[in-house]
Image (tube, grey):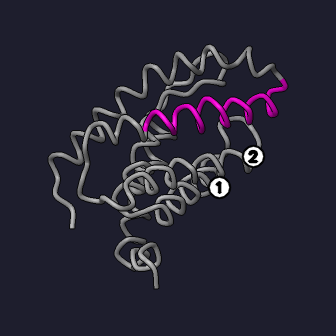
Amino acid sequence: MNNVEKRLTTSSMAIGGLLAGMSIILTRFFAIYLVGGSVRLSFGEIPILLSGIMLGPVTGGLTGAIADLAGMMMFGGGGGPYFPGFTLSAMLVGVIPGLIFHKTKTDYSLWKIVLTISITSLLVSLGLGTLWLTILLKKGFWLLLPSRIMARSIMAPIEVAVIYLILSRVKFR
């Protein structure tokens, strides 16, 4: 049994479920939509990122997928249809931090958190998220990108600060 399989325990799944629930609440109830609904400012990615960092890439990915699917089933897509690309993106938001912090679970240094948020912002939010919206809204990628860059430039530093404060103040087993 390898390291990743060992971390998929009942405890890690329960914590992942709680973090998925927090993500749903933060995304659905504490979000601000800008630019006709194509840009959302929310703290919903923070619990998924924390799941990946603390529990590993498998549990982080499952947390992201469950948060997206359960949120969609409970509350709908915010006016749009279900799109599996957003589920893939939510999974990657949990997997990427899990891969970055995989070997050094107790080293929650600021530079690693900044690296994690930068990669997820560029690859998932600005790259894939904009692509999914391009497909759904039938608007140009380059037309949607500037407003999404603005939103990520607001949210990324907030996510870094919140995650760093949580991880530096709370001791996890």
Q: Residue shown at 56%/60% (left/top)?
A: 66
Q: Residue shown at 42%/48% (left/top)?
A: 49
Q: From the viewer's perspective, is 114 left or right of 36? A: left
User: Quick one: which residue is furthest to the bottom in this view?
Assistant: 1
Q: Residue shown at 18%/46% (left/top)?
A: 168
Report x, y in % for residue 170: 17, 53
| Quadrant in the rendering for residue 163 | top left
**Magenta span has 101?**
no
Mark 1 crowdedness (10 Å alpha carbons): few <14, some 14-19, many ≥20: few
What residue type is disc 1 on?
A: Met
**Magenta span has 130?**
yes
| Quadrant in the rendering for residue 103 | bottom left
Q: Nearer the viewer, residue 119 or 170?
A: 119
Q: From the viewer's perspective, is 4 left or right of 81? A: left
Labels 1, 2: front one: 2
What residue type is disc 2 on?
A: Phe
Question: As displayed, is residue 81 above or below residue 157?
Answer: below
Q: Are marks 1 and 2 in contact (CB under 8 Å)?
A: no
Q: From the viewer's perspective, is 84 left or right of 6? A: right
Report x, y in % for residue 167: 23, 48
Which residues are drawn in magenta?
117-138
SS label for mark 2: loop
- Circle 1 sits on which residue? 73
CA gap between label 1 and label 2 equals 12 Å
Q: Main secondary structure of the magenta part?
A: helix
SS label for mark 1: helix
Q: Residue shown at 44%/75% (left/top)?
A: 8
- Circle 2 sits on which residue? 83
